[in-house]
Image (spheres, grey):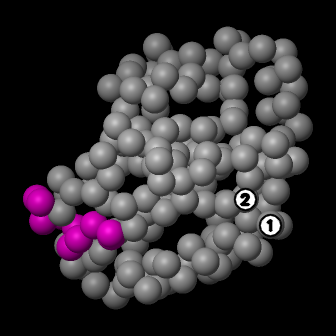
Amino acid sequence: MSKVENIKKLSHLSFAVKKFLKYYPWNDCNPSQSKKLDKKISDCKVAIVSSAGLVVDDEHEPFNHNIKFGDWSYRVISKDVDSSKLKEYHTSNSFDHSGIKKNPFSALPITHLKELEKQGYIGSVSDRHISLMGSNINKKKLLKHSVPKIIDIFKNDNVDIVIFVPV
């Protein structure tokens, strides 16, 4: 694990990236409502939503970098995906992509969930997980077109807990 003092600060970013981040329309991500979990975590099915822009090579189209304000689509990733088949298409140049390219499960930690399942900390790992494109300021289309479909996937799969992995 990286020591906090070794993590790069914003000083390594270009002027253009710093300016972009300064005016980026950041959201308050506090939920407007929440639901109390009515069973033990060790009985729950868990899924992941990652904004790493991951796709399964030869199965998914890459995220479209030409859509103004960001691609609001999503990709369904199987829990049995081979990490060598995952390709990252995140558009941001405000972070180092090498870690995700080297180990895509660092941004979609399915293997970690499988280990938690094996150890009995969670009930099961969902068969399906979701990858979105981060750096997306096209929130209205994401909320209108993608989020309802993602919710339906998780409801149909009887998912109890969703872990969000922002990238």
Count the labels in the image: 2
Task: Residue 66: give x, y in percent of width and height.
Answer: 81, 43
Residue 136 in sight here? no
Check whether the beta carbons of the residues at disc 1 and disc 2 lie within 8 A of each other. Answer: yes
Q: Residues within 10 Å of mark 2 (few under 14, many from 20)?
A: many
The residue that disc 2 covers is 72
Q: Is residue 12 left or right of residue 56?
A: right
User: What amino acid type should be assigned to the residue bearing mark 1?
Assistant: Lys
The single residue placed furthest to the front in the displayed view is 58
Q: Type of residue at label 2?
A: Trp
Q: Secondary structure at mark 2?
A: loop
Residue plotted at (77% across, 75% down)? 144
Quarter holding residue 97: top right
Q: Which residues are magenta?
A: 118-127
What residue did someone put label 1 on? 141
For label 1, the crowd category at 10 Å Cα-Cα, with few meaning under 14, some 14 to 19 and many 20 or more, is: some
